[in-house]
Image: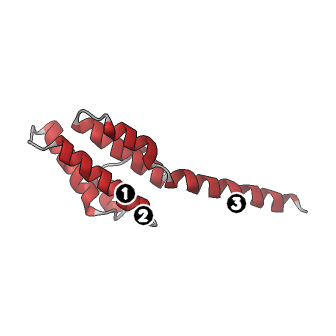
Amino acid sequence: MPVAVHCLEALGGALEEHRVLTRGAERPQRKRLDVAGSFDDVQRALQNYLGDRLNIPSSGITASVVEERRLPADIRAIFETCDAARFAGAHADLTTLKRNVEQVIDDLERSDL
């Protein structure tokens, strides 16, 4: 068998393995979300989940990136709530926000994102 065919077979296996890893991207972030004690922690858990799921650097994921990639509006709303609480002192319920993030993750895990 030509070397190119072996390389393509190996690459196909690696891509399948990567897809499986990104499908399970929620596991470590759910643990991080469970112990999140601040809005910054919640936002970071969501950023890390999205980064793992989309295979992009998590630190660059912002509300505008969510909009550019046409991700669900709930994600943008979560980022905006976290930013408002962190930088403008807006009042928000951390427990409710964590539940919203869990719901978003559940929805994204069921989607073909």
Measured as percent of width and height from the top left, residue 4 is found at 82, 60
Compare marks 3 and 2 and give the one earlier in the sequence.
Answer: 3
Q: Distance between the residues labelled 3 and 2?
A: 23 Å
Residue lying at 20% horizontally and 50% vertically, measured from the top left: 80
Residue lying at 21% horizontally and 55% vertically, measured from the top left: 77
- Tell whether label 2 touches label 3 (CB within 8 Å): no
Q: In this view, does 41 lie above or below 14?
A: above
Mark 1, residue position: 106
Compare marks 1 and 3 and give the one earlier in the sequence.
Answer: 3
Residue lying at 26% horizontally and 62% vertically, measured from the top left: 73
- Tell whether label 1 touches label 2 (CB within 8 Å): yes
The quarter holding residue 6 reads: bottom right
- Tell whether label 3 touches label 1 (CB within 8 Å): no
Classify residue 32 as left or right of residue 14. left
Q: Residue 12 carries which label?
A: 3
Around disc 3, counting alpha carbons within 10 Å, would you say few (fewer than 14), some (14 to 19), or many (20 or more)? few
Q: Hey, what amino acid is under mark 3?
A: Gly
Q: How far apart are marks 2 and 1 (CA)?
A: 6 Å
Where the C terminus falls, by quadrant? bottom left
Mark 2, residue position: 110
Q: Hey, what amino acid is under mark 1?
A: Asp
Closer to the eye: label 1 or 3? 1
Q: How far apart are marks 1 and 3 (CA)?
A: 27 Å
Classify residue 85 as left or right of residue 14. left
Res. 56 visible in picture: no
Around disc 2, counting alpha carbons within 10 Å, would you say few (fewer than 14), some (14 to 19), or many (20 or more)? few
Q: In this view, does 111 lie above or below 7?
A: below
The quarter holding residue 57 reads: top left
Q: Hey, what amino acid is under mark 2?
A: Arg
Classify residue 103 as left or right of residue 21. left
Measured as percent of width and height from the top left, residue 93 is found at 14, 43
